[in-house]
């Protein structure tokens, strides 16, 4: 699932991201939010789901610090987070504007769209209290 070749399941996700809106699939039968988009709901196997807008607010479920970036466009080091959004679904993203020594599991974060390599991507920032 990359913005260069989104495919049928993710076209709307990237269209919404271009407009700085974060969306996730929500099952029409059991109301489960899930990610990434897939043909059938992972909970009840229904094919009836639709994208709905997320608040983009969540907390850090887990994280890892990358000390060997894939290329020079990435900061070194950078932080990959597993975010638990408040609607009960999780996605991987990058935590930006945060020092690796300050990242903590459970920190409150909010989506922060940013152009990276010419594409609008949903990164996250630590939410100030
Ligand atoms: Zn379902």
Image (cartoon, rainbow, N blue to C red):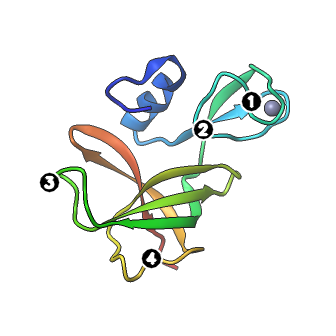
110 shown above or below 106: above
4 shown above or below 103: above
Return the x and y of residue 124 as percentages of the image width and height. Answer: 43, 59
Residue occupying image coordinates x 59% and y 46%: 54
Q: Which of the two marks, 2 or 4, is nearer to us in this view? A: 4
Return the x and y of residue 41 as percentages of the image width and height. Answer: 74, 30
State which tag comes first along the sequence, 2 or 3.
2
Category of crowding for the residue at label 3, using alpha-carbon neighbours closer than 10 angstroms: few (below 14), some (14–19), many (at least 20): few
Q: CA distance from mark 2 to mark 4?
A: 25 Å
Q: Secondary structure at mark 3?
A: loop
User: For mark 4, what is the residue?
Assistant: 103
Return the x and y of residue 62 as percentages of the image width and height. Answer: 56, 66
User: For mark 3, what is the residue?
Assistant: 72
State which tag comes first along the sequence, 3 or 4.
3
Q: CA distance from mark 1 to mark 3?
A: 38 Å
Along the horizontal axis of the image, is 5 left or right of 76?
right
Q: CA distance from mark 3 to mark 4?
A: 22 Å
Along the horizontal axis of the image, is 81 left or right of 121?
right
User: For mark 1, what is the residue?
Assistant: 41
State which tag comes first along the sequence, 2 or 1.
2
Q: Which of the two marks, 1 or 3, is nearer to us in this view? A: 3
Residue occupying image coordinates x 22% and y 66%: 76
Quadrant housing the N terminus: top left
75 shown above or below 20: below
Q: Are marks 2 and 1 in contact (CB under 8 Å)?
A: no
Q: Are marks 2 and 4 in contact (CB under 8 Å)?
A: no
The picture quadrant where one finds residue 35 is top right
Q: Does label 1 point to a residue whose CB lies under 8 Å from ligand 1?
A: yes
Which residue occupies the extreme left position in the image?
A: 72
User: For mark 2, what is the residue?
Assistant: 24
Q: Are marks 3 and 4 in contact (CB under 8 Å)?
A: no
């Amino acid at each position: 699932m990359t913005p260069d070749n989104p495919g049928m399941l993710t076209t709307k996700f990237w269209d919404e991201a271009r407009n700085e809106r974060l969306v996730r699939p929500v099952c029409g039968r059991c109301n489960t939010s899930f990610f990434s988009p897939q043909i059938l709901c992972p909970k009840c196997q229904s094919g009836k789901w639709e994208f709905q807008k997320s608040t983009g607010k969540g907390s850090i479920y887990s994280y890892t610090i990358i000390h060997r970036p894939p290329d020079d466009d990435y900061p070194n080091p950078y932080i990959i987070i597993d975010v638990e959004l408040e609607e009960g679904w999780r996605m991987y993203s990058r935590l930006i504007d945060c020092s690796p020594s300050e990242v903590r599991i459970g920190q409150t974060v909010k989506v922060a769209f940013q152009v990276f390599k010419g594409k609008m991507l949903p990164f996250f920032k630590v939410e100030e209290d």
